[in-house]
Image: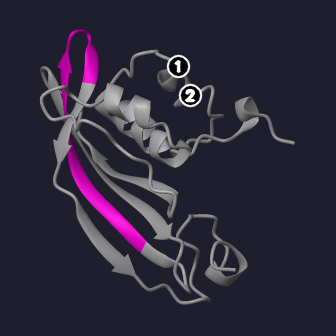
Amino acid sequence: MTRLTDQRCPCGSPLTLDACCGRYHQGEGAPNPEALMRSRYSAFVLGLSDYLLATWHPTTRPAELAPDPDTEWKRLVIVNAEPALDQSGQVHFRAFFYERGHVQKRWHVLEEVSRFVHEQQRWWYIDGTPTLTRLKPGRNEPCLCGSGRKLKGCCGG
């Protein structure tokens, strides 16, 4: 049985969850926008709605954020993370996921340029402009989770 402390971080880092995003989930402040973005992605994977709300800037935060049990997040790709200037920053990312509950799994990629602000000695997620694209990978294509295996022998099996 794999302990949570031995689990690889969902953000794609080679570190364990505890050594990577888990420490931010436990209350340590993220040092920059990219670290906050990665920890928020990991929180989506792990269903940590409280953390997502707590790291969302109060001026743009929704009243609640219900988890979606039919969505399985599979991989995060950071396209660009601009160095934080003054008290703001941006992170352009792609997050691959599939929806369960259909005859076939429906693959999607969520792409967003997220905005962050540094206030009260911490980084906050402000907002982003997301685009959602449905993907139709073939069974013999590389799996969208990033494992390097074919889809049919990995997440598509």
Residue interval drawn in magenta: 108-123
Residue matched to label 1: 26
Position of residue 75 measured from the top left corner of the image (x, y, whole percent): 50, 57
Q: Main secondary structure of the magenta part?
A: strand
Compared across the picture, whether 93 is left or right of 41 comes to left
Say above or below: 109 vs 85. Answer: below
Residue 6: mark: none
Q: Residue at x 32, y 53 (%)?
A: 93
Q: Is residue 117 magenta?
A: yes
Give percent across and percent down for residue 11: 51, 44
The disc at residue 22 is 2
Instruction: Bin the neighbour count of mark 1 within 10 Å (Cα to Cα): few under 14, some 14-19, many 20 and up.
Output: few
The answer to whether any part of residue 12 appears in the image is no
Q: Is residue 136 left or right of residue 32?
A: right
**Residue 7 spot, x, y in % from top left:** 71, 39
Q: Which quadrant of the figure has residue 46?
A: top right
Q: Position of residue 142 (x, y in %)?
A: 58, 78
The answer to whether 140 appears left or right of 157 in the picture is left
Q: Are marks 2 and 1 in contact (CB under 8 Å)?
A: yes
User: Callout 2: few (<14), some (14-19), or many (20+) C-alpha neighbours within 10 Å?
Assistant: some
* Residue occupying the point 22% across, 44% down: 114
Q: Residue at x 24, y 55 (%)?
A: 112
Q: Quadrant of the N terminus?
A: top right
Q: Secondary structure under badge 2?
A: helix
Foreground: 123 or 66? 66
What is the three-letter code of the residue carrying label 2? Gly
Picture quarter containing residue 131? bottom left
Whether residue 85 can be seen here: yes
Q: Residue furthest top?
A: 121
Residue found 36% across the figure and 38% down from its top: 37
- Kind of residue indicated by mark 1: Gln
Query: Measured along the vertical axis of the image, is residue 142 above or below residue 136?
Result: above
